[in-house]
Amino acid sequence: MLRKSIVLLVLFSAVVLAGCGVLSGGSTDRTVSVTGSGSVSLPPNIVVVNIGVQTQGDNVAQAVAENNRRAEQVTEAILAAGVAQEDVRTTYFSVSPQQQYDPQGTPTGAVTYWVDNTVTATLRQVDQLGGLLEAALGAGANSINGVQYGVDDTSEAEVQARQLAMDDARQRAELLAAAAGETLGEPISISTSAGGQTFGGVYAVGGVGGGGDSVPVSAGSTEVQVQVYILYSLK
């Protein structure tokens, strides 16, 4: 009985030692991680611009009424310049009372009310932006900002940019692997950033406050950019 127990103990110890050898003998995975970038340049086919009317007055009701009158004229001019009704929306409206002070800095008790009404217009004929801005300024707009060119549908360009990013990532990984004396293996994990646009173009506004010189604009180009993050194995 004692002999059988000793034999079983020896066999059990051998199994345990063999198991420990497998666990500690596994090689550490060798990997390389890279970031790849891809971009596609497109001509813009939309331009978004914020057009505002700012007025002031001592009477809040009169200040708002005057602002409404001018804002309606500006909206009519925007529509007449080729912007569709569904592409015009009010994005900001505020009435701000401001206390008046005398030269010594003492409140006079008088209050001036500032009214700001801003609409955002999306123009789908980008070559008509100059005319749109002129029309808005001539109708009473006195605030133009946030002119931004873009592309309304970038899905196809994003596919192209993503493939360029994948190719760029693999080239970078191959260079790193070769520099380390290794051979590049297969991708282990891949993640990507959402496609985005970077906007080109410049603009200048003349005659703020009604009419004036023409408004020079330049559309430039729009870049659709994608980044991928890939972890490769090394052979």
Image: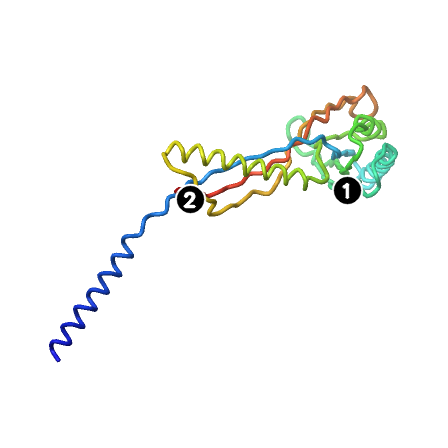
The residue tagged 2 is 233
Q: Which mark is residue 195?
A: none
Locate residue 209: give its quadrant: top right
Q: Residue at x 83, y 36 (%)?
A: 83
> What quarter of the picture does the N terminus occupy?
bottom left
Which is more N-terminal, label 1 or label 2? 1
Locate residue 129: give its quadrant: top right
In the rendered image, residue 3, in percent from the top left (x then y), is placed at 11, 76
Q: Is residue 59 visible?
A: yes
The answer to the question of whether label 2 and label 1 lie on touching residues, with beta carbons closer than 8 A, is no
Q: Nearer the viewer, residue 173 or 100?
A: 173
> What quarter of the picture does the C terminus occupy?
top left
Q: Nearer the viewer, residue 189 or 81?
A: 189
The residue tagged 1 is 90
* Disc 2 residue crowd, few under 14, some 14–19, many 20+, Cα 10 Å: some
In the rendered image, residue 122, in percent from the top left (x then y), is placed at 77, 37
CA–CA distance in space, label 2 to label 1 = 53 Å
Left or right of 22? Residue 65 is: right
Q: Nearer the viewer, residue 26 or 47?
A: 26
Locate residue 91: give its quadrant: top right
Q: Residue at x 46, y 47 (%)?
A: 188
Disc 2 versus disc 1: nearer the observer: 2
In the rendered image, residue 162, in percent from the top left (x then y), is placed at 59, 39
Q: Residue at x 38, y 37 (%)?
A: 182
Q: Secondary structure at mark 1?
A: strand
- Amino acid under disc 1: Thr
- Amino acid under disc 2: Ser
Q: Secondary structure at mark 2?
A: strand
Q: Is residue 117 visible?
A: no
